[in-house]
Amino acid sequence: MRTSHRPARRAALAGSLALALLAAAPAAHAAGGGTTPREGSLVLVGGGLKDDNSQVYGEIIDRAGGSGARIGVITAASVPASQDPDAADPDRCSNSACNGAYYAALFEKHGAADAQWIPIDLDHVANADSDAVVAQVNSMTGFFFGGGDQYRYVRTLLRGPRQKDSKVLAAVRAKLAHGAVVAGSSAGAQIASGPDMVSGGESYEALRDGSAPGYFEDPARLGYLPRGGFGFLRSALIDTHTGAYGREGRAYRLAADTGHDRVYALEENTALVVDHPGSNHEQLTVVGPNGVAILDLRHARTATSAAGWTLRAARYSHLTDHDRYDAHTWQVLPAAGKKRLTPTATAPVPANTDVFHSAANPDGTPYSFRTTARALAGTRTQDTATATTFEDAPGFGVTFTKSDRFTAWSGDGGTAHTLVGLNVTIAPR
């Protein structure tokens, strides 16, 4: 996708009084009964999906029927044409209509029989209850939700303070329940969330200040919508652009604050494929060049003192291409061909003074959290390593510890690719 279409670190969108009403109670969607999808599948991408990622585009198309796939593209998270100063320039535009056409062309390039923009955005909110658009949705075998700002999906496809489904969303939900694939990237993956969907924030500010319900103009403030998104996936919180934007800290904090015991933290240009979503047979598979982190808070403990917030006994697993995960049993199943890694390195784990890749650090490196975790997995001379935040006053330290349950797996025999059950403590320094 063109650079102009890539979402910013957090898209700006003004809050409103309606948001306070939306953020008042647990999710309760109505979609022809609001049933939890059980038969279709989800393909959720952590953002930054490259045009040439035939593995992920192919996965979506295959699940939509292969050469007969008909993909409905929904880009209501983008600004509408009325807010795009370059709307008339096809080479520079970045709005819902031109982004929809762009993705539709990409899906056809990758082998779909047909791909069409579903014309819903902030300029066309009424279309979400149009019988003609519902008929268009019903002719599709799969759907792709583009990136931007997930709150725009709330504003365009959900109705009222109880967030009831519009007719179009009800139709998409019904198609999913009967076998369609629903995919999305960045905000399009985030909106699949159930209760307490993240609405913005940075890791350091999240650790320092905590979370609050709502949508905030300050992009660093950790906010969430208690009613959540569309609720296609409820077995965990979802976060996106993890690693690239250093969002592990905000994900741990939001989960702890809202009482969730698991987060699926999606990395860029990589998909989390979910079969049987919402059932006891929910199975997840990673597809793509990066990975998906499973943040496990089942045994985590938190405390707040004058020094700041502390999280102890959390766990971190990192899955890569073709690894699988059983959501019901919490079991990681490394991909066939990967072998248990025996650490051989003797050099110390490199110092890391920007564990969450701070936006304030011009020299920061993406995937910093993952890098330290993998380095610890590969050494035989250390069982713990501590990395710190770029910011201080207070600063926070993240301590990674190999427990008896920890394992690492490798596809080449020498590099830690898959990590299972690394202990994580976050504490003020």
Image: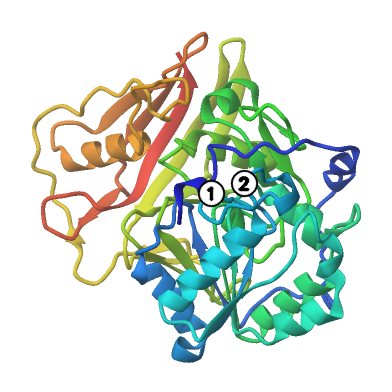
* Residue at screen point 90% across, 52% down: 161
Among the 4 quarters of the image, the one containing residue 35? bottom right
Tell me residue 87's x, y (percent).
Answer: 65, 51
Q: Is residue 108 above or below residue 14?
A: below
Pointer 2 local density, CA inside 10 Å: few below 14, some 14–19, many at least 20: some
Front residue of this view, candidates 343 and 89 = 89
* Residue at screen point 46% across, 70% down: 106
Does 247 sit left or right of 110 as displayed? right
Front residue of this view, candidates 65 and 84 = 84
Tell me residue 158's x, y (percent).
Answer: 82, 60
How is the rendered protein coloured? rainbow
Q: Earlier in the sequence, mark 2 or mark 1?
A: 2
Measure the C-alpha gap from mark 2 to mark 1: 6 Å
Whether residue 203 can be seen here: yes
Tell me residue 308's x, y (percent).
Answer: 58, 16
Looking at the rendering, in which quadrant would you find the N terminus? Answer: bottom left
Pointer 1 local density, CA inside 10 Å: few below 14, some 14–19, many at least 20: some
* Residue at screen point 46% across, 37% down: 245
Label 2–label 1 contact, CB within 8 A = yes
For label 1, the residue is: 92
Q: Is residue 114 above or below residue 378?
A: below
Please give the count of numbered marks on the rendered protein: 2
- Mark seen at residue 86: 2
